[in-house]
Image (cartoon, rainbow, N blue to C red):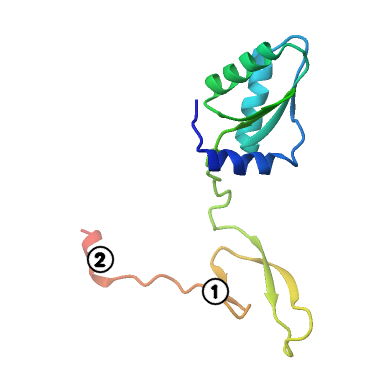
């Protein structure tokens, strides 16, 4: 179970005030499917509210401890039938789709000449060997220079 300082817990309580419950635990209780949904919610949001239907306070406290223990989360607040749970979001590494060889769309924003009007926004398709300069013009990359010495060594 993750531990929070009182200052962190207070800040998270304030942040959770505006949230709506994203998981509702019903009559069946804390099933593996419900735990999976709570886990997915923590992965995507970090801070979530869970509503528990049922009047037994001891059962709610037991569920709260089970959720935090199994999922490595921190208990933030248990008020009435609402449970507030926090777990830091995992860093997601987005893979680059294109290798840079094909065509790609680039948005060019140029400020107006007078500076008082709106900037002009244009979308342009550029090739893999082209780049956009700071001024917004498109330049083609120069071919890579080849060393005479390296090419002579490689031909042996």
For label 2, count other residues whose C-alpha is less than 10 Å away and answer few (under 14), some (14-19) or many (20+): few
In the shown orientation, is residue 119 left or right of residue 9?
Answer: right
Q: Are marks 1 and 2 in contact (CB under 8 Å)?
A: no
In the shown orientation, is residue 42 left or right of residue 51?
Answer: left
Does 12 appear above or below 129? above
Does 123 appear above or below 47? below
Residue at 75% across, 42% down: 18
125 vs 46, nearest the viewer: 46
| Foreground tag (1 vs 2) | 1
Q: Mark 1 — residue?
A: 140
Alpha-carbon span between mark 1 and mark 2: 25 Å
Please provide percent x and percent y for residue 1.
50, 25
123 vs 145, nearest the viewer: 123
Please provide percent x and percent y for residue 154.
25, 59
Residue at 29% across, 71% down: 147
Q: Mark 2 — residue?
A: 150
């Amino acid at each position: 179970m993750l531990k929070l300082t009182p200052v962190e817990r207070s800040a998270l309580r304030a942040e959770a005030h505006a949230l709506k419950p994203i998981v509702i635990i019903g009559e069946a209780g804390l099933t593996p499917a419900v735990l999976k949904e709570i886990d997915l919610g923590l992965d995507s949001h970090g801070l979530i509210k869970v509503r528990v239907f049922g009047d037994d306070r001891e059962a709610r406290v037991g569920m709260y401890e089970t959720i935090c223990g199994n999922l490595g989360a921190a208990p933030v607040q248990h008020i009435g039938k609402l449970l507030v749970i926090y777990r830091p979001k995992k860093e997601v590494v987005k893979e680059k789709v294109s290798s840079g060889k094909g065509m790609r769309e680039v948005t060019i924003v140029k400020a107006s000449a007078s500076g008082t009007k709106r900037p002009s926004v244009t979308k342009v398709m550029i090739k893999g060997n082209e780049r956009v300069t700071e001024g917004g013009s498109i330049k083609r990359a120069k071919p890579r220079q080849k060393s005479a010495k390296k090419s002579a060594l490689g031909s042996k």
